[in-house]
Image (cartoon, rainbow, N blue to C red):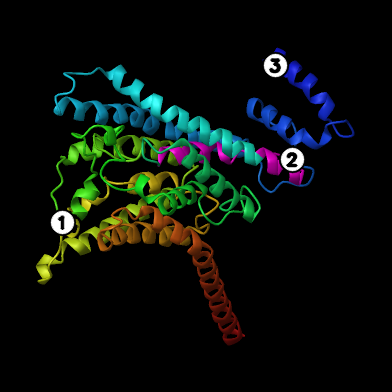
Amino acid sequence: MEWIRQRLDKIKEPFAPGKKYEKYAPAVNAIDTFLFTPNHTTQKGAHIRDAVDLKRTMITVVLALIPALIFGMWNAGYQHFTQLVDAGTIEAFTFWEAIGHGALKIVPMIVVSYAVGLGIEFAFAIFRGHEVNEGYLVTGLLIPMIMPIDFPLWMLALSVVFAVLVGKEAFGGTGMNILNPALTARAFAFFAYPTYMSGNQVWVSEASSVDAISGETILGSLAAGENASYSMMDMFFGFIPGSVAETSTLFILLGALLLILTKVGSWRIILSAFIGAAVMGLIFNALPSMGLTGNQLTNFPWYGHLIIGGLAFGIVFMATDPVSAAQTMKGKWIYGFLIGFLSVMIRVFNPAYPEGVMLGILLMNVFAPTIDHYVIQSNIKRRKKRIKSATAQVKTAV
């Protein structure tokens, strides 16, 4: 490592203050920061002293995403080859064939996401004259993980451009955005290229080229009035069609455990969001007992809503985004509960769009500051009331 340190110091010399390429220093410093701990310290009094910095936080989230990503690679190949086996096109396939097929599809998406997104980040850092932030380390991985497996790379690149420019840099960059950048990219893709983001054939690799492959998701089947063709265990483990890394609730919960243990992700938001989704599911399940006619989505077990679609992935990795989420303790409970509640409500009430977690999170991103405002105002009023009561007691005692 010492050799790398010396080489980097040599490379950085022309970019030092007052040197010829000083303007481009942020791009070079970003590479240094990625490889080594930043060597600068605060010049003013620090309120909190901690070894945790933004880079460590982002790397922790990336590590939490790895289990779901690896499973997503395997499941992409598994869904592809399984339906070919059912159609009689092939007889069998191996584990490595499945994960190899998935990797060939997903790795290029990750490369494009990072190349385009970091390119824009570097350009803005140089233009504004500030250091490159590590925030895109997570966003660059999240975006391809929430897209369909065969989503065209040029569409992915445009979605990344929109997410970084409009969803992030327009607000001032990392730490200033009000919307989750990854979900902003998905929202752009969904409304700009709807035929590539919905339907029965976008969720299984190369489904459009093989007539026998349907690729319909569970939510799609339920929205169409059909019964789910997968068991609850298949849904929980993730052996179902869906976006790249959203299918396995098991591996998503493993990532959630890491985020909670390292205190990077808020357990209050995660727990309250699942509670909100469960409550909304129970309300819909109760409709027949009240004499109201339901459909396949309303009759679907409440616990099933928690393990299908992108609900679990969105709650764990995007609702907990510390920038766009609520900041107060009570606000986190309200914020998370409403995300789960609205996500299930949207997926049931809108058959044309049976997945609601994206809209649920983005909507609550907008209202998160309002939630915090009223929580703080409530605390202020409560304290004023206590002060008034205490003052009255003192006067009475005197």
Residue under the image location 78 percent in, 21 percent down:
11
Q: CA distance from mark 1 to mark 2?
A: 53 Å
Percent from the top left, x then y, of residue 199? 28, 47
Among all residues in the image, which is located at the extreme right? 18
Q: Given the current orientation, which residue lies at the most extreme top position?
A: 3
Q: Amino acid at mark 3?
A: Ile
Amino acid on which the number 2 mark rests in the picture: Ile
Which portion, as a residue range, is magenta?
A: 122-146
* Structural distance between the alpha carbons of marks 1 and 3: 59 Å
Q: Which mark is residue 267?
A: none
Q: Which residue is mark 2?
A: 126
Q: Which residue is mark 1?
A: 296
The x and y percentages for residue 244 are: 36, 36
Q: Report the amino acid beneath label 1.
A: Gln
Residue 206: say if magenta: no
The answer to whether any part of residue 285 appears in the image is yes
Label 3 Cα crowd, 10 Å radius (few <14 / some 14-19 / many 20+): few
Whole-percent x, y for residue 265 in the image? 47, 44
Question: In what element is the residue under mark 2?
Answer: helix
Q: Earlier in the sequence, mark 2 or mark 3?
A: 3
**Location of mark 3 (residue):** 4
In the shown orientation, is residue 370 left or right of residue 303? right
Residue at x 79%, y 43% (from the top left corner): 43
Q: Secondary structure at mark 1?
A: helix
Q: Main secondary structure of the magenta part?
A: helix
